[in-house]
Image: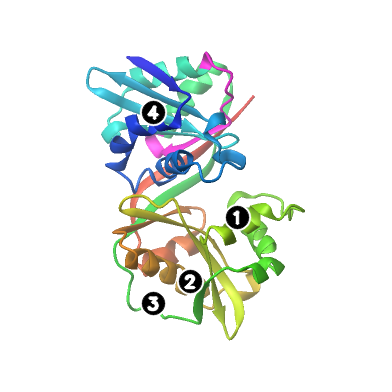
Amino acid sequence: MEIKIYTDVNEFYGDVHGIMAAREEQNVIPLGNIIIGREGKDKTGWRDPANWFMATVTSGAGVILTAVMTPPHNITLYETDNLENDEALASLIKGIRETDYEIPGVMTEKVLAQRFAKAWSEARGVKHRVHKDMRIYELLKVNPDIPAIGTLRLVRESDMSFLPYWREGFNSDCFGDTPSVKADPESYRYLIENKMLYVLEDNGMAVSMALMNRAMNTVCGVGGVYTPPYFRGKGYASSCVAGVSRLILERGFTKCVLYTDLANPTSNSIYQKIGYKPICDSLEIKFEA
């Protein structure tokens, strides 16, 4: 086994893109991040690949394990064709320990996440805990029976009156973060400038939102789904996600992909009614001293 740690995102992209693209729907987050880093259009925050950890483990058969971490976020992993290889995992852990990188956690396919967490905890003498139990869904066709409510539109500058509060409400619901609207508006305006975020309006009032993210060859992700508490239970989230999913398919992508928290049965039920089918379970595991 041979580990290679990269400093050039273009070289890393060249070595792993084809391998990870064979399962785009499973690799929508790490592969999408690599594409963002290679394009280099935006290097704010975690998007600057100069700060990333990028590595492959190879054997005579080629790349068998890929790892990428965009600090401060968790490390993400992919075993080529989902073939388990504990020797490759051990080589990766040894290579990481020879760097200055700290690993806050791992987020990847469930079994791989568990194996990495166990091995990393033993190697570093730390504890680990499951932070989030997730499922990855894909959609090929939107259920035509989902009622279209209101009007779907791109978020715009005038929406800055509520967008920061909605984004922090989403972060609170999804990640358990304490809501804290940033004084610096650029992180919110980024979504406007890059035409990623869509808002559903009903009777002229914004009621729900969802975004397109990490566009790849055949797959595009859906995320950031949020409806303020006082608008919930009215079908707005279903209509918004269905509308964004239709737009993705109309633009030539063959699949839409999204992550759900299995602790939230409501969202899982909504997405399946829209037409999303489960393809893979994923874990986010945190490490603690």
Judging by the rendered image, the residue that carries numbered circle 2 is 240
Q: Residues within 10 Å of mark 2 (few under 14, many from 20)?
A: many
Placement of 146 over or under 24, stated as above or below? below
Q: Which residues are magenta?
A: 97-112
Q: Nearer the viewer, residue 251 or 110?
A: 251
Which of pointers 1 and 3 lies earlier in the amino acid sequence?
3
Task: Give the residue type at disc 1.
Answer: Tyr
Pick out the residue farthest to the left.
61
Q: Are marks 4 and 1 in contact (CB under 8 Å)?
A: no
Checking the image for residue 144, the label placed there is: none
Q: CA distance from mark 1 to mark 3?
A: 30 Å
The disc, 2 or 4, on the residue closer to the chain's N-terminal end is: 4
Which residue position holds label 1?
A: 190
Helix, strand, or loop for circle 3?
loop
Q: Which mark is residue 11?
A: 4
Q: Position of residue 25 (x, y in %)?
A: 34, 49
Q: CA distance from mark 1 to mark 2?
A: 20 Å
The residues bearing labels 2 and 3 have C-alpha atoms spaced at a distance of 10 Å
Name the amino acid, label 4: Glu
Say whether residue 172 is visible: no
Closer to the chain start, of discs 4 and 3, is 4
Along the horizontal axis of the image, is 180 left or right of 14? right
Quarter holding the C terminus? top right
**Pointer 3: residues within 10 angstroms few (<14), some, or many (20+)?**
some
